[in-house]
Amino acid sequence: MTIGSGHDAVVIGSGAGGGAVAWQLCQMGLKVLVLEAGPAFDPPTDYPLTTAGWERRGFPSPPGSRAMLRYGDLGTLDPDSEDLASWSRGGFPWRLPSGAARPPSDAGYSHVMGLGGSTLHYVGESHRLHPDVFRRHSLTGQGRDWPLSYDDLESYYSQAEQVIGVASDGAADGRPRAAPYPLPPHPLGPGARALVAAGARIGQRWQVNPRAALSQPYNDRPACNYCGGCSRGCPLGDKGSTDVTFLRQASRTGRLSVVPEAIVTRLLAGPNGRIVRADVIVQGRAETVETPILFLCAGAVQTPRLLLLSASADQPLGLANSSDQVGRNFIETLAWRSTGLVAGLKGSHRGLPADAICWAPDAADPGGFRLNHTTLEAGLNGPIAYANRLLSGHGVALKEALRNQFGSAVSVGAIGELVPDERSRVTLDAQMRDALGLPVAQISSVLTPAALDRLRRMRLAARAVLAEAGAELVEEAGSRDAFTATHVFGTARMGTDPTTSVTDPFGRTHDHPNLWVADASLFPGSGGGESPSLTIMALALRAAKAAA
Amino acid sequence: MTAPSLERRRALLVMLSAGVAPLLPHAGMASGSQDLASLGAVLDIVFPSDALCPSATELGVDAMIREALGPQGPLLQLFTLALGWMDGIADRPFHELPTAQRTEIVAAMATSDFNEIPGRFYHIARALTLEFAYAAPEALGGLPLHPAPQPEGYAP
């Protein structure tokens, strides 16, 4: 097969950004080629949540579905922050000593390369950024303002919610809506109900979390049946990953071509700055692709890597990098989780993951972080995690304790705003090469003292609601001990000033008129803990409309 | 956020590679033997049978752990050393001791220093045992769980 030319637009990546771009362009009548570096997954066979031993299997990782990476400076485990060290009642009584380098966790940069990108393993929280996020620096002096407003994105948020199928109740959350959610809310599970009740007594307003999981059949997809396995891959197709939403609908236009296992190795710019060609390895065979419009949607690690890999004599710093901002301003996920056992609570393994959220738990840190109910995301819907992490001891006493206490765990997660340290960036590694002989991305990410202080506030808020719920703490974990990031941002940020940003407010690169970015690389800031997928989709829909 | 990885064997190997080697001279137990005859007896103290659920060996956990240990490497070395030490505590190998005595030995290991071989072996053997045992549907007796989340799910 030759993928060649003849397309109106080429999209690199098929996750939240690439899927939405492809959908929008196809709707507008363009012929679109999507190049996806990873494989296509088959949900019924690849996400085996029907077979015993399911708990030992995470999201599948066949060859080519994870990028090779190297980690650079991740900071050190400062003795002054040892109070933030992770611990669990049942886990290993071992931790890295203070002064050691902060390591990446097993998950590290947690991502998927595959048709659907990281939406394949996302939980599906579908958040709009709060309007104040777009004016963060103006309002607080912290972080950066965005070069657009909430109003600029509102209609695109609605469009994305309609396509992926977001379920919620529309209760006030400070994010004005012109249209209702397309689906009614899911019922809250027992753990969420405990947090709603406890939160109300201490001034934490917990509410339904908008989720891209179907509360009833929608389009051609079935309703969720609450298997709790969203992050292990949704076997039913009710979760709003882009393979079963944007890409499926775009394919029905007859104008979409998708090529999995197509690794773009280099982009070439012509003398007028326009991108004239992409070099691609398709299932081991070298190809070139020409296109009038190129969208780069590979995420905040691989997008800057490809731009940097495309350096030439004319662009020695890489493409789109006259500002020297490509790869800089890397923002990881600032996260905390506290877990407790609530005497008398039953069935906390039931229901939808991340079913409840508290947007503003700390009046002294408005917009700084949010809490959610994260028992199922934490893996506490199976006996292995319970026994190994939450319970100590062994023998018959342990088995009886598990029977008595299974279903009583409640986890509260927190994700917060992170203003990056200047050392936090993505670069090309000087030594490590991938299978094609190309330098891999190196991630450096250092937590600032302000970030550690925010982690303490997050912990305080999480502990408060658990204490009010009557929970006995049994496990806590957070970003201080190890780098774990599912939400990453900032490495090709948008702006109005070409000397301090990589793209304009629509995602068009300042340096190349037909090269667009549509992923979380664009984000000037992390937001206040909102999950980014819906904003990536909204930005992508807006960019594609502008580009068409 | 995504569910934490359960690739415990990898995590354990990483931990062990930094931890066991320095222990060997101090512990003075470098036998070189790979006799794991007492493995099942240890696992059945950690995970005994009861009215609702078989024991670790009845679930085949000992065979799964032997496979997980592999033909060589630090994890196998740790298990070999620890089991050798346990076999040398009394006048008979561990697996021939009365249940009460075996229980007492494992209880002592549970409270021993994680940076010494008995303590580290206990925690790693426990983690692997629970992971393999509770992966089996037969171990779910008394728990409000299906063998797998699909196709029934857990409606709230």
Image (cartoon, coloured by chain):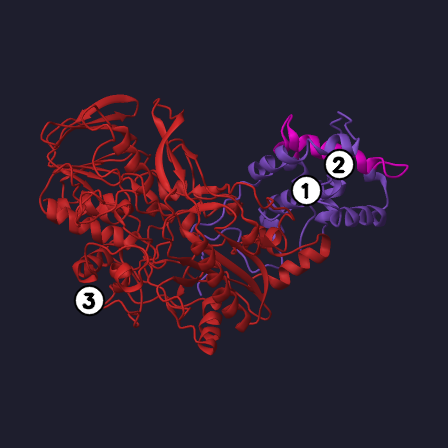
Instruction: Give the magenta range.
Output: B66-93
- The percent position of residue A311, horizontal first and vertical second, equals 24, 27
Q: Please, what is the three-letter code of the amino acid marked with disc 2?
A: Ala
Q: Mark 3, chain letter?
A: A
Residue furthest to the bottom: A201
Chain letter, colour purple in render: B
**Horizontal placement of A7 versus A259: left or right?**
left
Is residue A301 covered in magenta? no
Question: Which mark is on residue B125?
Answer: 1
Read off the residue under disc 3.
Answer: A179
Residue at coordinates 68% horizontally, 34% vertically from top-left?
Answer: B20
SS for callout 3: loop
Residue at coordinates 86% horizontally, 45% vertically from top-left?
Answer: B98
Q: Chain A hue?
A: red
**Horizontal placement of A434 versus B51: left or right?**
left
Q: CA distance from mark 3 to mark 2?
A: 65 Å
**Camera-side residue of A92 and A281:** A92
Task: Tell me if residue A157 can be seen.
Answer: yes
Predominant SS of the magenta segment = helix
Q: Mark 2, chain letter?
A: B
Q: Quadrant of the N terminus of chain A?
A: top left
Read off the residue under disc 2.
Answer: B82
